[in-house]
Image (spheres, rainbow, N blue to C red):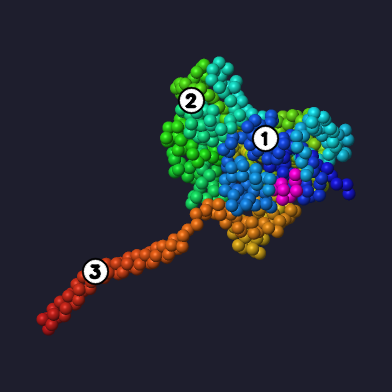
Amino acid sequence: MKVKKIAVIGAGVCGLGAIKSCLEEGLEPTCFEKGSDIGGLWRYEETPDSGRAGIYKSLTCNTSKEMTAFSDYPVPDHFPNYMHNSKMMEYLRMYARHFGLMQHIEFLAKVCSVRRCPDFSSSGQWRVVVEVDGKQKSYIFDGVMICSGRYTEKHLPLQEFAGIQEFRGRYLHSREYKHPDAFAGKRVVVIGIGNSGADVAVEISRVAEQVFLSTRRGAWIWKRVWDDGNPMDTVVCTRYNRAVQKLLPSFLINRWAENKLNTQFNHANYGLQAAHRVFSYKTVFSDDLPNRIITGRVLMKPNVKEFTKTSAIFEDGTEENVDVVLFATGYTFSFPFLEDDLAILGSQHSMYKFVFPPQLEKPTLAFLGILQPAGALIPTSELQSRWVVRVFQGLKKLPSETDMMAEVNRRKMKMAREFMESPRDAHRVQYIDYMDEIASELGVKPSLFSLLLWDAKLAKEVFYGPCTPYQYRLQGPGKWTGARAAILTQRDRILKPLRTRVLQPSGSSSSRWLWVARVCAVLFLSASVVIITQMVLEPEKNQALRFEVYQKETVNELM
């Protein structure tokens, strides 16, 4: 049987997972990367390529390493739990080398167009035109995996801010921000309180004269460090917690989380009170923002009403002189190389499980990583890839177009009930639910009942422990023999980078003396209770004896 050729567009985290999945399934992938290196979003550059998100030098992952890893390649145990972008790049290079992915990537190759072949209804093939060194070349592929991501075009809504064109200072998008040096001594207003907005405001506030953080609807601030110092997602993202959430009404779950976050600091007092429930809108991570607010380095402000030549006027009527305006207003995504994309995707980019366009006669085009999971993207897009290649091979069938559209509409209705309406957040999914959904399509969803019967120790960690990607390698296609060990040792890898101070032998001696002291204290308290009890009961005994003697004397006198 002829080996099918697959085009993979983009060599970021989604593209690497797609190449690996193709090789696992016996397909022949060719990855086109317009940059000079792998990594996509995580590759730091002072001047990023057009059509690619730019990151700032200090960017650190918001999901911990155990939750972020590829499902059959754990992050090294000595790596920090939350990886800086340079560490993430190091991990991606290790992954690419380990599985021999680099030889399947063509760098500095810009995809110009992707269009259906004339006989697409029977062949399902695509013609892909690629430009290298100024010359275009045409290829025919049996399938296409689009892995260019959702952070391609910056969203800069200047039309919403009156007077911005007359503003004499500098304005820029967070894509262009790299480090805080250029903002030393400046008065800066940051517009938008997503993860980038919070990070940038905190970092700039260390050198700026003053930073104003402007937000329309406020935000709930989560911290990476959670109970007992554990990474937040390893504590919150468990199958047990998800089971509880499904049993309880959403208002109780929201109230619990909001109370939890408010115990760290009162959001209303800090000017951060959100206009939405905590789980109905995107999550914002910042360990440092409350500290910068309480020290006055960051001042929270409502939305900007208008700009003058030298100042910003906010909706509460206050006016502040500013030198720089930084728009942390996010990104939009587009596929300029995809010809006739409206016919393929529809006006709302409606795709079956956020992967397959329902309207195509043949399921040979797939989009990976354009959703927004409430968790890590790497394992989500990797699982999508594993499903896609099985569909490309004809080993898994998709429903009819009617059934797929019905499922798309049901999902939209469900999301409308659960999440706040936002055009740029229309692809949000609950992490464990979506992972299990795709895993069920693929046949790799872990069976808790089976594990409970045959491996109770593993079942306990799968249910109560963090829902790590290794769970989706325990069974079915792509089963990995190291999955069980990876799950049972995940807590060791979490602790390894934290325990960098080796305790001296005297520490163990002190520990033993501490236990001796505790035992002595318990014995002392026990003895005290006995003595006090006797002191209380002794007068009662004496009184009883005196009463008994009195009775005997009275009887004798009467006789």
Q: Range of the magenta residues?
A: 95-102
The correct choice, above or below, for 22 with respect to 109 in the image is below
Q: Position of residue 228 (x, y in %)?
A: 48, 51
Circle nearer the N terminus (2, 3): 2
**What residue is shown with label 1?**
150
Tag 3, which secondary structure? helix
**What residue is shown with label 3?**
535
The correct choice, above or below, for 13 with respect to 209 in the image is below
Q: Is residue 128 left or right of residue 549?
A: right
Residues marked 2 and 3 touching at CB (< 8 Å): no
Give the number of the mark in front: 1 or 2.
2
Tag 1, which secondary structure? loop
Tag 2, which secondary structure? strand
Q: Nearer the viewer, residue 69 or 553?
A: 69
Label 1 crowd (10 A; few <14 / some 14-19 / many >=20):
many
**What residue is shown with label 2?**
187
Q: Position of residue 401 (x, y in %)?
A: 78, 39
Q: Real-space Cα distance between discs 2 and 3?
A: 73 Å
- Amino acid type indicated by mark 3: Met
Give the number of the mark in front: 2 or 3.
2
- Amino acid type indicated by mark 2: Arg
Q: Residue at x 45, y 30 (%)?
A: 299
Give the number of the mark in front: 1 or 3.
1
Q: Is residue 216 left or right of residue 404?
A: left
Q: Say which mark, if any, is on residue 192.
A: none
